[in-house]
Image (cartoon, helix red, strand yellow):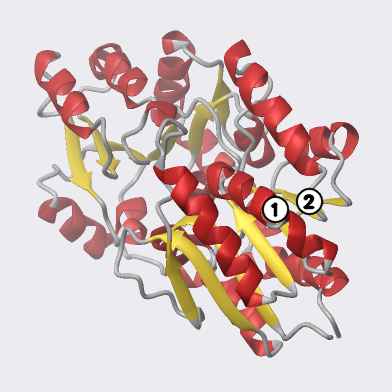
Amino acid sequence: MEKPKRILIVATSDIHLQVFHLPYFAMLKAKGYELHAAVEVRGNAQVEGIDQLFDLPFKRTLFTTKLFTAYRKLKQIIKEGNYQLIHCHTPIPAALTRLAAKGARKVGTKVMYTAHGFHFYKGAPFSYWATYYPAEKYLSRFTDAIVTINNEDYDVAKTKFKAGQTFYIPGIGVDTKRFKPVDAIDKELIKSKLGLPKDSFVLFYAANFIHRKNHQFIIECLRDIKRQIPHLKVLFAGSGTLFPAMQELVNEMDLTDTVHFLGFRKDVNDLLAITDISISASRQEGLGLALAEAMINNVPVVATVDRGHKELITHGVNGFLFPQGSQLEFAQSVVKLYHDQVLAKEFSRRSAEHIKKFFIENSLAEMDKIYNKFLLK
């Protein structure tokens, strides 16, 4: 019996779907597909384009019995749903999905996994390779397609894993419709609302306060940078478990006048309009969407050497990359762009051209081709 035009999307949370996947859902709906989603509800449980949403306990840790509950529920959802395609995202839900869908694959359901950045990567701790690499390699044999968003991950998946097919797309896509020009008067107004002086030199880091984003590194560099840029201001936009600890560190280092904690923001466009340098100290990224958005807004970028950042930045050509943990090279990069506005503008111009490769329409076009290989015409 032919399967209905129905797809199951599995990811960590409804927030993840709302932030990253709505354009893809619109594309699938236009093809006439009914979309179901299995996530942990951490937001409002309303995701545009999703016809039915299942709430599963996808916790952030492996050390919880609730994952067994999630697995049993997921297996039942898959059995009853008779899906043509199951598309999973994020490591823990994707692992449970591929195990739960083994029976469904035997009767024609296809299973696709988008890796938004494998947890093992060049320079990662040995424990990451010892844990995540064998797990992903084993699970790949239960995967009809692996989709990667950077070349390092693609090479590993293509040459080392056992998935039916492996694909690369240029990131999950940057939506240029989110951005609009902000004139000089508006910029002064934005600074005023944030309590920033007109002549402040602004570093902006949009990232949740988690270990991987490494805010502590940025904070510990600021005293040295501030000696060279007296009117320095740093904006942190995001929330997360390490938020209180970073506030305490800023207080201890007497940097409360320099660092502004903005919390979760929906006005990133306005914040980028007053940003002199967009920064990232992330330990690892699948791509680095926040930097990509900065590049669209003609903001120069400084970031750690990382597989995702290397997709966006060529060191010394359209930005600066600094080695993980190098306070000296991070500070030198920021100070260099502070003093050399001509170079900063040239970096911005080159970035604005390079980032076109990662526009949402390009990612959608590539994903459309991939979907067409696995969906019934």
Image check: 332 left or right of 265? right
Image check: 351 left or right of 289? right
Numbered tag placed on residue 113 in the rendering: 1
The image quadrant of residue 196 is top left
**For the point 52% across and 69% down, which residue is it?**
37
Label 2 residue SS:
loop
Query: CA–CA distance between discs 2 and 1?
Result: 7 Å
Most foreground residue, 254 or 123: 123
Label 1 residue SS:
strand
Where residue 332 sits: x, y (%)?
A: 45, 16
Image check: 341 left or right of 248? right
Quarter placement of the N terminus: bottom right
Asked whether the beta carbons under mark 2 and mark 1 sit within 8 Å of each other, the answer is yes
Res 91 visible: yes
Image check: 205 left or right of 123? left
Where residue 168 sits: x, y (%)?
A: 79, 50
Give above or below for 54 relative to 219: below
Most foreground residue, 204 or 211: 211
Most foreground residue, 51 or 291: 51
Give above or below for 374 relative to 227: below
The image quadrant of residue 126 is top right
**For the point 27% across and 21% down, which residue is it?**
219
Quarter placement of the C terminus: bottom right
The amino acid pointed to by label 1 is Tyr
The amino acid pointed to by label 2 is Thr
**For the point 70% across and 53% down, which residue is it?**
113
Numbered tag placed on residue 143 in the rendering: 2
The 10 Å Cα crowd at callout 2, few under 14, some 14 to 19, many 20 or more, is many
Where residue 173 sits: x, y (%)?
A: 61, 60
